[in-house]
Amino acid sequence: SLLFVGGLPKVTEIIRAKLLSRAKEILVGGMHGIGDKALPGIFGNKYRQLNPETAALFSSLLEANPMDVYLQCIDELLKTDATDAISKLTAPLLLITGTEDQYAPPASLGAFSTSPSNCKKTLELPDCGHMPFLEDLV
């Protein structure tokens, strides 16, 4: 069995545009402020409201990344395309996403439809963003 949490075979076009825009912003102004701008795409609204300290910590940890390393991560994410690999998966798949996940929203899980697996289950966690493994603990 395979488990996919908040992931897709490749980024959606909406997220591609957001990440390219973020990369340009970082090149001009550095990492300062990027964490707060990224938070709505990472955590759901409820989690951010109930856990402002954790959200702030995550924001500062994100901004502590060296600019070149973070930009390289964005570049790798934009280049990654596992569509061909997904089309060969025959093992049972469990796809987990948050209902507020902007990177892998429930509507985009159809990207796994190319898998010939006879067993694909989806679990949508309410009020969760891109980190349901952390957010659903609350």
Image (cartoon, helix red, strand yellow):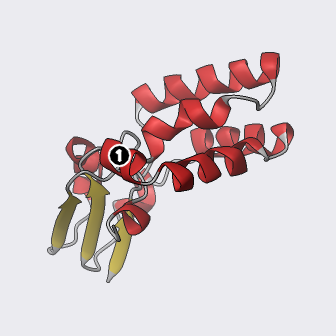
Residue 18 in view of the camera: yes
At 22% from the left and 54% from the top, the residue drawn is 113
Q: Position of residue 135 (x, y in %)?
A: 38, 61
Residue type, mark 1 in image = Gly
Residue 84, quarter of the rendered image: bottom left
Q: Is residue 11 visible?
A: no
Question: 98 above or below 94?
Answer: above
Residue 52, given in percent of the width and then of the height, sits at: 49, 48
Q: Residue at x 20, y 59 (%)?
A: 124
At a point 42% along the width and 46% down the height, the residue shown is 48
Element assignment for label 1: loop
| Residue 133 or residue 118, whichever sits in front | 133
Quarter of the image that includes the C terminus? bottom left
Q: Residue 98 location in percent, x, y?
A: 29, 54
The residue wearing badge 1 is 44
- Give the image location of residue 133, x and y in percent: 40, 68
Q: Nearer the viewer, residue 1 or 22?
A: 22
Pick out the residue farthest to the top: 28
Q: Is residue 81 above or below residue 90?
A: above
> Mark 1, residues whose alpha carbon is within 10 Å: few (<14), some, or many (≥20)?
many
* Relative height, residue 37 to residue 90 (above, below): above
In the image, 123: left or right of 26? left
